[in-house]
Amino acid sequence: MKKKHTMCPFGKCPICKDNFLTNKPITQKLDEKMTLNLYLQGCEDLADTFVRKYFGKEATYSWIADEVGGVIEVADRFFSVTDIADFLRYKYSTKMLFEYYDRDLECRSGGREWKYNIYSYKKLRK
């Protein structure tokens, strides 16, 4: 059995020539069920990474309505998978994440329009 490698998280591995996520030859198409399972596992991995990074190793989270891939609740805050991916992608600091979250919540709950997304807010703050 070929050993999985961690050097190439997506696509074809230059060492084993297999798809990194499934350890199947890259030429095989993934079926619908496998693709969905990979997506759901990816959502779990994103949530785990996000919570550990911004809330600590001991923090716990839950998926709202047990809908993996939707919204998580952690420490009385709510984050969609898209937001989770963006905070990680744009390398937000913990301070900046909570600043963004609080300002976003303040605007939305006050009926004001929030003019920034995670990307534009980070660019503005540089």
Image (tube, rainbow, N blue to C red):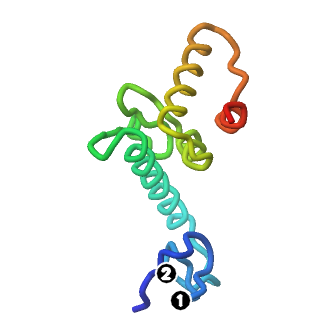
Q: Determine the CA span between mark 1 and mark 2.
A: 9 Å
The image position of residue 107, as x and y in percent, is: 61, 14
Q: Residue at x 40, y 33 (%)?
A: 73
The image position of residue 11, as x and y in percent, is: 62, 74
Q: Say if mark 1 contacts mark 2, CB within 8 Å.
A: yes
Whichever of callouts 1 and 2 sits on the residue coming sooner in the sequence is 1
Query: Would residue 93 appear left or right of 122 to someone viewing this image?
Result: left
Q: Quadrant of the N terminus?
A: bottom left
Nearer-the-camera pick, 15 or 123: 123
Q: Residue at x 68, y 39 (%)?
A: 119
User: Label for residue 100?
Assistant: none
Pointer 1 residue: 16
Q: Quadrant of the C terminus?
A: top right
Q: Residue at x 62, y 80 (%)?
A: 12
Q: In this view, which residue lies farthest toward the front?
A: 126
Pointer 2 residue: 23
Query: Would residue 90 appear left or right of 36 to someone viewing this image?
Result: right
The image position of residue 70, as x and y in percent, is: 50, 40
Amino acid type, mark 2? Asn
Q: Residues within 10 Å of mark 2 (few under 14, many from 20)?
A: some
Q: In this view, which residue lies farthest toward the left?
A: 58
Query: Would residue 67 appear left or right of 107 to someone viewing this image?
Result: left
Query: Would residue 27 appear left or right of 1 to someone viewing this image?
Result: right
Q: Is residue 55 above or below residue 114?
A: below
Secondary structure of residue under mark 2: loop
Secondary structure of residue under mark 1: loop
Q: Is residue 57 above or below residue 78?
A: below
Amino acid type, mark 1? Cys
Q: Is residue 54 above or below residue 48?
A: above
Q: Nearer the viewer, mark 1 or mark 2?
A: 1
Q: Which of the 4 quarters of the picture holds residue 112?
A: top right
Q: Residue at x 35, y 29 (%)?
A: 75
